Amino acid sequence: MILSFESKLEKSLAQERFKRAGLGGVESSWASVNEVRDVIGRYVKLANIKLVNAVTRAIDPRIRKSIELNLDAVLADSDDMLKAMNPKKVKPTAPSLLKYEGDPPDPDVSGLKVHVRAAKGIDDKDFAKIDDVVFYYLNGNAQPAMIDAVTKAYRLGMKTGFMSEMKVPDKKAASLSLGDIDNWEGSTRFIKRLKEAGVSDEYAFAAQWAKENAMTSIAIYDENGQRAGKAYETIMKMFRDQVAYTLSRGEDISKLRTRLIFPEKWTDVEGHQHDLAEKLSPDELRQYTVAHLNRDWDRLAFDQMQRAFQAGRLTMWSATGFPVYVRFVRVRNRGKQCDHCKAWQGTKLRVFRSYEEFQQSPHYGGSDVVIDDPKAKIATWPGKNNDDRPYRDQWVAAPAHPHCNCDYVMA
């Protein structure tokens, strides 16, 4: 797989990024969550490279001299990159993760041949063929893997939430692996507590939450039988734009692959959202967030795992029926922290089972404002997020934004 760049500097930066593997950024405070996140991040990131390669192979190339980088050679030369991108090298500590040790299957591109016309770009019929490959690959491979991973993260949240109730220090629980938590001596009491709450199968309960709350961002058929999903819509549009742009400049397929593998060169997604808040409209900022979140698989994996994990903890804590409070804290002090998260440190929130329960309570003051409670002025609930909220109007929520490493702890 050949990638091409306009300058030697751009090429060297790409090589360095691959060698750093892209997985060494923000980490969760919880070792068990990182296990799930790393496995699914590697799996879908490798799947994305296969998808890009499959689509570009089906397009007639336009020849242009450029500075090239052999991706296969980079992978072979870098142990770190090989470890990061090849799930076969991953050695998870729990049997429940073994199903992702194999590589994602190659996309089915039988019969796909897109004939490009340099002067006119490509027409809708050609685009439709590319859209087919994108949708079926995301729906058939990335979607099931992500749902399974979110299910695991949600279960971890429930179990560590119960650990907090049993007075196990969060610092100690955060150091436990997935296997350690599954084998925790208090698991029997945890299952008993769930049954008392009417939850007969924790796996089914977590999987249902994953399907309803976490995974519409990949690729699905909606209630009308139409293709939908943030990732599908974003990648589909990005493929179309980048193919047309590459052809209009008379460039070759290796240049197109480069743009698809490095979408941040195209969308400027490496910036921080709050730096752009005053420059973009709310809709532009939302589109920027969607493109950022769904084209960087490691970031998507981190955000989804952390969100599901925190939702599992809130679900467990709110199940008692008694008033429960948490604090918004940054447990692991790594990387940059946005201005909102800095201001929110130590904020106390009242936990509700759902937003609907909060709205029907006497404490609902509009939005996420709590009234008539001397202990907290803000509410939270499982699944609270800032997906469609502009930066200036964000809610206090963990995670607050992509690659946020703030947590909820019991107050």
Image (spheres, helix red, strand yellow):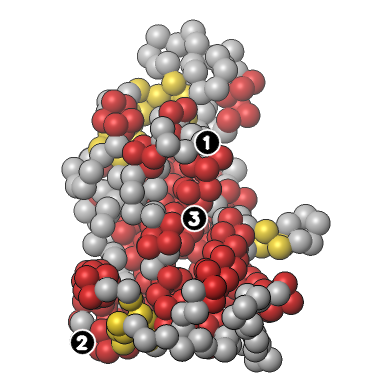
Check disc 1 and give the amino acid type: Pro
Percent x, y for residue 319? Answer: 51, 34
Which is more toward the observer, 45 or 98?
Answer: 45
Q: Is residue 189 above or below residue 138?
A: above
Looking at marks 2 and 1 on the same chain, the residue that comes earlier in the sequence is marked by 2
Q: Are marks 2 and 1 in contact (CB under 8 Å)?
A: no
Looking at marks 1 and 3 on the same chain, the residue that comes earlier in the sequence is marked by 1
Q: Which residue is mark 1?
A: 282
Q: Is residue 143 above or below residue 367?
A: below
Q: Please give the name of the residue rendered at 62% of the width and 87% of the height, measured from the top-left corner.
A: 109
Q: Can you name the residue that lies furthest to the front here? A: 119
Looking at marks 3 and 2 on the same chain, the residue that comes earlier in the sequence is marked by 2
| Left or right: residue 131 compared with residue 177 | right
**At numbered mark 2, what does the secondary structure look like: helix, strand or loop?**
helix
Q: Which residue is mark 2?
A: 77
Label for residue 333? none
Total marks drawn?
3
Check disc 3 and give the amino acid type: Ala
Mark 3 → mark 2, Cα distance in angstroms: 30 Å
Label for residue 291? 3
Q: Nearer the viewer, mark 2 or mark 1?
A: 1
Q: Is residue 20 above or below residue 272?
A: below
Q: Nearer the viewer, mark 3 or mark 2?
A: 3
Residue 147 visible in this rendered orientation of the protein: yes
Q: Can you name the residue that lies furthest to the bottom here? A: 110
Mark 2 → mark 1, Cα distance in angstroms: 43 Å
